[in-house]
Amino acid sequence: MPHDYDEADARDFAERSATAIAEGTGLHLLIVDAESDRLLGSCGIVEMDWEEGRAELGYWLAADARGRGVMSRALALLSRWVFESLPVERIQLGIEPGNEASRRAAERAGFTLEGVLRSWFVNKGVRRDAAMYSLIRGELPS
């Protein structure tokens, strides 16, 4: 989430999300507090490869919502839904190697670190490495 995120950025995200849903290439969901409906973050399918049966998830969490297991629960719930509802055999996460909080959330949700992919993606105009995590159908903890 960029620090200078504004209403125009939010509208652009909403439009891109609607397009992804319509095209079957993504699904962006909100994480909210069950009692107050306060926005805590987002977790969703950011890339869908129907031919290969592979989905990539992406997520972010507000700073004041961290450290409570919110993201690991969201990842586990979304992963369970993906495996139960879609013809997907592999769910993957590409996480910047230095993002320890995201890596811990992935591991607590049952994802396995496969290795670091060098120069895997571009974020804010800079090529970055990705610690690649995966969850294969049948591996999701109960």
Image (spheres, helix red, strand yellow):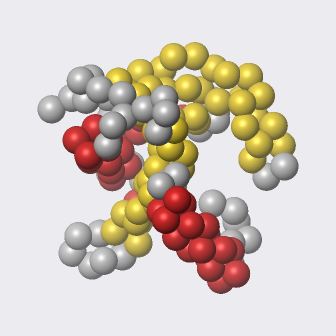
Figure check: 93 above or below 69: above
Give x and y (percent) for residue 2. Answer: 69, 62
Residue furthest to the front: 51
> Is 42 on the left or on the right of 85, as rendered?
right
Image spot of residue 15 (x, y percent): 60, 74
Q: Is residue 10 left or right of residue 103?
A: right
The residue sitting at 59% across, 26% down in the picture is: 131
Q: Which of 24 and 35 is in front in this view?
A: 24
| Residue 111 in view here | no
At 52% from the left edge and 70% from the top edge, which residue is drawn? 18
* Front residue of 67 and 97: 97
Considering every residue shown, the one lying at the far left of the view is: 142
Q: In which quarter of the image is the C terminus?
A: top left
Q: Which residue lies furthest to the top in this view?
A: 115
Task: Where is residue 83? Give x, y as percent.
Answer: 28, 38
Residue at image location 64% in from the left, 35% down from the top: 96
View extreme (bottom): residue: 7
Q: Nearer the viewer, residue 25 or 66?
A: 25
- Left or right of 11 in this view: 137: left
State whether residue 110 is above or below residue 68: above
